[in-house]
Image (cartoon, helix red, strand yellow):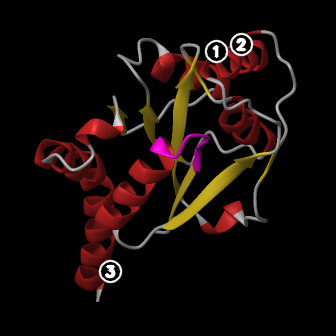
Amino acid sequence: MRTLLLYVSVTGQTHAFAQRIAASLGNVDLVRIKIKTQIPTNEFWKIVKIGFLVWWGGGMKYEVQSIDFDKYDTIILGSPVWMGRGAPPIISMTKKYNLKEKIKGLFVTCGYDPGIVFSDVKKKCKINDVKQEIYFISLDSFEDKEVQKRIDEFVSPFKSDTLTSKESLLHEK
């Protein structure tokens, strides 16, 4: 089983947690979707711009390295929560490459409770078979042992799938 962790990060928070999840998973390809649309650094204007892009479909531009999605049977998506929603590039890529059957995990980063973001992303992407969801509230708790425990719980089904596959191959011989 090959796993891809595909994520969007503007401020670096989602990037930091994507790296921690990847380290806990071990054998995973980590790919960051780069936002090409200019996002202001001023917090007020950043919120206004992102709000426009998320709620009124302002056409966010992004780029990602060339990915052969056929070689992955599991994809974990990571997204910041923007205006109560998942980042548009995550939803756009999931639809464009028809990834809904491969997405088995979702994680989000936010400044507060993520609310309906998981159901929103699953609905917009038409994802039905998500094994795990996790959210992180801030980088303040990044070094916290409790955060690592939550990450380990999040990745455990993906690790056990790999172990189960290897075990079944051994038993077949």
Q: Residue 132 sits in which quadrant?
A: top left
Q: Is residue 17 above or below residue 124?
A: below
Residue drawn 34% across and 40% down?
139
Which residue position holds label 2? 48
> Which residue does the image show at 72% across and 37% down from the upper left?
89
Tell us which disc is closer to us: 2 or 3: 2
Pointer 2: residues within 10 angstroms few (<14), some, or many (20+)? some
Percent coordinates x, y for residue 48 in the rendering: 71, 13
Work out how far the residue at label 2 is from the one at label 3, CA to CA, in angstroms.
53 Å
Decide which of tag 2 and tag 3 comes sooner along the chain: 2
> On the image, numbered disc 3 is attached to which residue?
169
Image marks 2 and 1: residues in contact by CB distance under 8 Å: yes
Question: As shown in the figure, which amino acid type bears the numbered disc 2?
Answer: Val
Q: Position of residue 63 (x, y in %)?
A: 80, 51
Along the viewing direction, whichever of 138 and 19 lies nearer the viewer: 138
Judge from the rendering whether residue 59 lies leftward or rightward of residue 69; answer left or right.
right
- Left or right side of 96 for 22: left
Q: Give the mark nearer the N terminus: 3 vs 1.
A: 1
Residue 44's disc is: 1
Are dots 3 and 1 in contact, CB under 8 Å?
no
**Which amino acid type is marked by label 3?**
Leu
